[in-house]
Image (cartoon, helix red, strand yellow):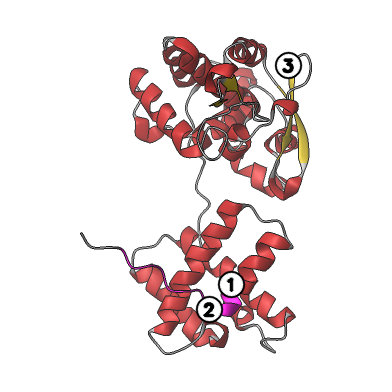
Amino acid sequence: MSRRRPAPPLPRHVDAFLEMMSGERGAAANTVESYRRDLEKFSAFLARRSKAPEGADPRLIRKYLASLVDAGMASRTTARHLSVLRQFFKFLFSERVRDDDPCSQIDSPRQGRPLPKFLNEEEVGRLLDAARLRDGAEGLRLVALLEVLYAAGLRVSELVGLPVSALSRDGSILIVRGKGDKERMVPLSEPATEALAVYLDVREHFLSKRGGRVAPSAFLFPSRGKDGHLTRARFGQLLKEVAVDAGIDPGKVSPHVLRHSFASHLLAHGADLRSLQQMLGHADISTTQIYTHVLDERLKQLVNQAHPLARVGGRG
């Protein structure tokens, strides 16, 4: 049986950059890991040309980005790679490893902003109905997870990592710690509050047992695994399973799709962008504006329903 070769060590300046992102800027572990993969790819590209990553010039960076496009990478993903390189070379410049920033001469690839994918309200209802048909503690937990995700529009990492202390005494509000370690208050719907109350009665089922005793956990959705809480991957898997039960294409369903559904449905029912920005935990309202397609549709309906000239025979 062949063994996989261990990954080669990272170039020291790449390693230093990742340490800075984690230690000084407090970047999430998933973000650091994503940066690591992108910079490993960049380093390997340069190594084949006998160059270290810190020695790249604009010509080589352009060649690297062109190689990503040639490999079929979407412009949005290529732009993400360039964003990582910009941060890396700014770090090298600030540390005086380089006396210039080669990325300053490179334009970002043009990209259209894709509309977010979301489920309609009927499909979300079918998901919840299918989850309620599941038996036992696992079923009650799944209902609570779906209700909270749909009611609060959380990122999946925020959802599975919620501490018990995030829930208010009456169970109607969550204090969510999001990106950049910023806290936000998110109100819960009545169905989500009720689903959590029912789930909390069986939460002990998911706690580890040591020496015949239940080991306490700070997490709202604990697990016996090494993370101590339900993992993103496991929740994603459960979501796909319940989508099949609901007769919905599992390829259409993910935790992030439910977050988009929360935002789109709120706007469709009259919420304003600024309130939505606060609930989603977006630092910049421009990020929230990807949901304005819903507002566009609502305005069209308003004109068609309310404008006198839009009515049949209104010009008579």
Residue 111 image point, x, y percent: 50, 60
Q: Which residue is mark 3?
A: 171
Q: Element type at marker 3? A: loop
> Are circles 1 and 2 on residues that touch, CB within 8 Å?
yes
Distance Cα–Cα, label 1 vs label 3: 43 Å
Tell me what residue is drawn at x 58 percent, y 67 percent.
84
The residue nearer to you, when weighing 248 against 162, is: 162
Asked if residue 314 can be seen in this view, the reply is no
For disc 2, the neighbor class at 10 Å (few under 14, some 14 to 19, many from 20) is some
Q: Which secondary structure is most common in the magenta stretch?
A: loop
Q: Is residue 162 magenta?
A: no
Snapshot quadrant of residue 135:
top left
Q: Which residues are magenta?
A: 4-15
Instruction: Choose the circle earlier in sequence order: 3 or 2.
Output: 2
Q: Which residue type does callout 2 highlight? A: Pro
Q: Which residue is mark 1?
A: 15
Which residue appears farthest toward the left when viewing the image? Answer: 1
User: Which quadrant of the figure contains the C terminus?
Assistant: top right
Q: From mark 3 to mark 2, how far is it between C-alphas? A: 49 Å
196 up-or-down from 243: above or below: above
Q: Mark 1: which secondary structure?
A: helix
